[in-house]
Amino acid sequence: MAPSTCRPPTVSLGSDLVLSAQPGVGRGLPCGLRSLATTQQEFSKDLKRTGAAIAMNRSMDTWVSSLSKIAGLEEAFERHKAAFDLNGDGSIGTEELLVILDRCQLYDEIFTPITVREYFKTLHGGSGIHDVDFVGFSNTIRWVADMRRLDLDTVVRRVIVLSKRLCDKEACV
């Protein structure tokens, strides 16, 4: 017997339909292996898209970071003070700070502006405070992170990003 080339087995189902173990052979009924190959191709495309999206987000973060030179929370406080000093006294009032927290999307159904107002009323022996300096601002940010059970870096990053968005020279509010 002469050696022959191995071919996958085929089964004839009638006039036009043929099933084969080889992908892409046969008319009308794709083989399961072809579906696996298609799935793998789609998975590969999704990985490439995800990688591209991550790279784009990182470049956007780098670009936003370069818009202004805010190194930390204290500079962000100064920027917020310049943007939110609604009454012109050179500090952030508690109501102005409520606006900052709202724009940083730090409120939820449990942690509300009422909660923050009550917190400020309990400070200074119950007499409350009306203006917030940097120390009070940073303590409030820490308290917000604790109340929301968020990482402090996450809350600080939101405050800094908001200050960059509000106080960019080209788009300052």
Image (cartoon, helix red, strand yellow):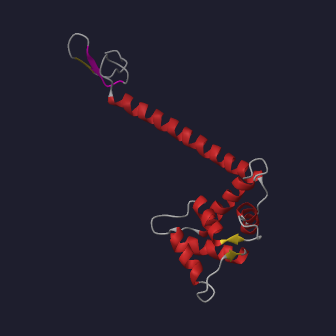
12 over 75 or under it: above or below: above
Locate residue 53, reporting x and y percent: 59, 43
Locate residue 140, reporting x and y percent: 62, 74
Q: Residue at x 37, y 24 (%)?
A: 23
Q: Residue furthest bottom?
A: 125
Quarter of the image where one finds residue 90: bottom right
**Which of 86/38 is in front?**
86
**Which of 35/108 is in front?**
108
Q: Residue furthest front?
A: 87
Locate residue 124, reporting x and y percent: 63, 87
For residue 153, say whether it is visible.
no
Taking 122 as reference, is 36 left or right? left
Residue 21 within the segment the image draws in magenta: yes
Locate residue 43, reporting x and y percent: 47, 38
Q: Residue at x 46, y 34 (%)?
A: 42
Q: Residue at x 57, y 83 (%)?
A: 122
Q: Residue at x 61, y 84 (%)?
A: 123
- Looking at the rendering, the stretch of residues picked out in magenta corresponds to 17-22
For residue 59, say whether it is visible.
yes
Quadrant (top left/top right/bottom left/bottom right) for the N terminus? top left
Taking 115 as reference, is 92 left or right? right
Count the labels in the image.
0
**Which of 71/7 is in front?**
71
Residue 80 within the segment the image draws in magenta: no
Q: Residue furthest top?
A: 15
42 over 136 or under it: above or below: above
